[in-house]
Image (cartoon, rainbow, N blue to C red):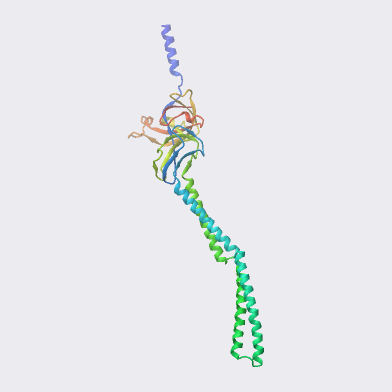
Amino acid sequence: MRCVALLLIALLAGCGESTQATFQGYVEGEFVYVASSQAGRLDSLLVQRGQQVTAKLPLFALESANEAAAQQQARRQLEAAEAQLKDLQTGKRPPELDVIHAQLAQAQAQAHKAALQLARDREQYAVGGIARAQLDDSQASADSSAAQVRELQSQLIVGKLPGRDEQLRAQAAQVAAARAALAQADWKLDQKAVMATRSGRVFDTMYRLGEWVPAGSPVVRLLPPENIKLRFFVPEPVLGRLAVGQAVSVRCDGCKAALPAKITYVATEAEYTPPVIYSNESRAKLVYLIEAHPTVADAPKLHPGQPVEVALQ
């Protein structure tokens, strides 16, 4: 009887020990789908499934012959527009001005000759040596020669001037448009070689080499460690004990030790609610979704879809 009493006492003591609350859940990943805004044939795939990558690491490249040609065209158009603007700003070239100088010297010599002839004809007309018509011809020739001199002098002044303000503004706008077209061509070409925007594990590749990739279609599916989270459900009576930021521990098959995590989301609505009135007996049937995130260092140890056991702390 004494042995039986001791056994009952031991059993009652064991029943009185408090046990830690644990809940079943699973691992979920929020994937980053890496795509190009441009369409093209997949020329190179630089990563493979399961590979760990860092930010700015090249992932894949699409064929880019058309974009490279468009870039060269835009660059040449910009160079032409800039050259035209520079030409308008500098006026005529020195050899062109030399031509005007030579024409002016010739016109001045012709005007001097016409002026001398006009002076002689006036003297001859005064003594009656020539007719009035000959004097008029000499006068017209002298006036024409003098006008040609003034014209060439004006051409020389204009040749040294830059283009009109309206022409300069119009050409400057052409340069700006060409520069914007080049920037657009550069951007399209850069979109053909895609790099990782974040560090993480390559979860899957969606295309094979040589396949046509539509614009915006993901080629690589990344899983950053900070995007791995735990999802588990707790009954309604436990909900009041949980809060965002609360620490929990996670165990999984193959994990050598429990992994620390923190609750990042507590659902405000129940799930799997039975169609009954919320009586005291039915409250325990209500469950609420809870999400927790492990540390970035421990996240790679977990895999999407993996069942886990979450213990409250």
Residue 210, given in percent of the width and then of the height, sits at: 40, 40
Left or right, residue 239 beside residue 142: left
79 shown above or below 103: above
The outermost residue toward the front is: 129
160 shown above or below 224: below
Residue 255, given in percent of the width and then of the height, sits at: 46, 24
On the question of residue 267 being in view, the answer is yes
Q: How many numbered tags mark residues here? A: 0
Left or right, residue 110 beside residue 189: right
Relative depth, front residue between 305 and 2: 305
Relative depth, front residue between 234 and 48: 48
11 shown above or below 95: above
The outermost residue toward the bottom is: 128
Residue 195, given in percent of the width and then of the height, sits at: 49, 40
Residue 127, given in percent of the width and then of the height, sits at: 66, 93
Quarter of the image for residue 44 reads top left
On the question of residue 243 being in view, the answer is no
Q: Residue at 64%, 87% (x, y): give it.
A: 121
